[in-house]
Image: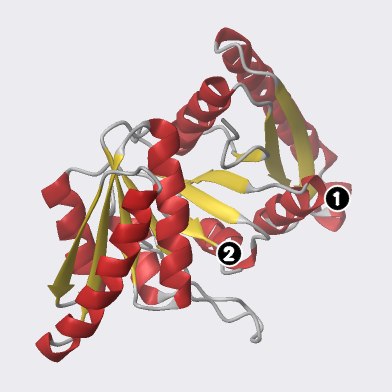
Amino acid sequence: MAHLFTRLLLATEHTEFDLGAEAVAMALAQRCQLPLATVLPLVSNPEYEALLPQIAAQAEQAAALKIAELRSQAQAANVAIDLRLRRGEEPYREIVDEAASLGTELIIIRRRGKRSLLANLLVGEMVSKVVAHAPCHVLIVPHKAHMWSQRVLAAVEPTEQGRQIVATAGAVAAECGLSLHVVSVGGAETERPKIEAFLADLLRQARQAGVAAQGEVRIGKPFTEILAARAACQADLIVMGSRGDTRIGRALVGGVAQKVMGLSEHPVLVLRSQ
């Protein structure tokens, strides 16, 4: 059976916060018998390094150790790894550019790194920028998360993008031999009939494709209801879209996606709009 994603890219700085992303990426590559491209972004400022070359040398040594450890992990998992170190002032840009150059279909990345004293972000700034600018889908993995094995949850709105999300989530569920649960959240009870009709059509199509699928309509705050639906159906992968706007200087990830990504203790697959 053809795999849904065949060109994977693990983006990691190989810290304690990257453990979940590394484990899931290795598991995906191992299960699907795929090579795993890996990029380790290294912050680099030529002017600063020219003044303090010893700092740059220490960073290079630390990166070399991380690369050796990642190669050893991949070998132990019997995964063919293609690991590259990319230097630049903006780590997210190095990740996005690497994905573009490889024709990557799925980036696997952590949720956030170490929080600064001035920031209390649900999702790290680097990760938010990767999701916003990535040329492909992005899988965000909390540091204690594991490969999904129970159920896939698709969070959708009654739009064409919602149809695409369910189609992709259904393909993931089918490939992993899991069931699919679809949730759509309305802002008022008056929206329920329209959403129910939309879901009924999606579920019919999913079942015709051989996927065991259920669905529900919830009314309330979208991120709260999505997370509640995940807990109720015990899904361990959330699939959803991201509504960004790249017409402004810094692309943004939709508020619902940000909150779900930041609060979920399970992987969240954010799909890029076609």
Which tag is nearer the camera, tag 2 or tag 1?
Answer: 2
Residue 261: quadrant of the picture: bottom left
| C-alpha gap between disc 2 and disc 1 | 29 Å
Observer able to see residue 113 = no
Disc 1 residue type (three-letter)? Leu
Q: Quadrant of the C terminus?
A: bottom right
Does residue 172 sit above or below 38 in this rendering? below
Does residue 240 sit above or below 23 in this rendering? below
**Residue identifier under label 2:** 129
Local packing at callout 2 (Cα closer than 10 Å; few below 14, some 14-19, many 20+) is many
Mark 2 or mark 1, which has the lower sequence index?
1
Q: Residue at position x 82%, y 50% from top?
A: 101
Q: Position of residue 172 (x, y in %)?
A: 44, 43
Q: Residue at position x 74%, y 57% from top?
A: 89
Observer able to see residue 227 = yes
Disc 2 residue type (three-letter)? Lys
Q: Residue at position x 46%, y 31% from top?
A: 24
The image's mark for residue 51 is 1
Q: Position of residue 25 (x, y in %)?
A: 53, 32
Residue at the extreme bottom of the image, as rendered: 190
Along the line of sight, the residue nearer the viewer: 53 or 104: 104
- SS for callout 1: helix
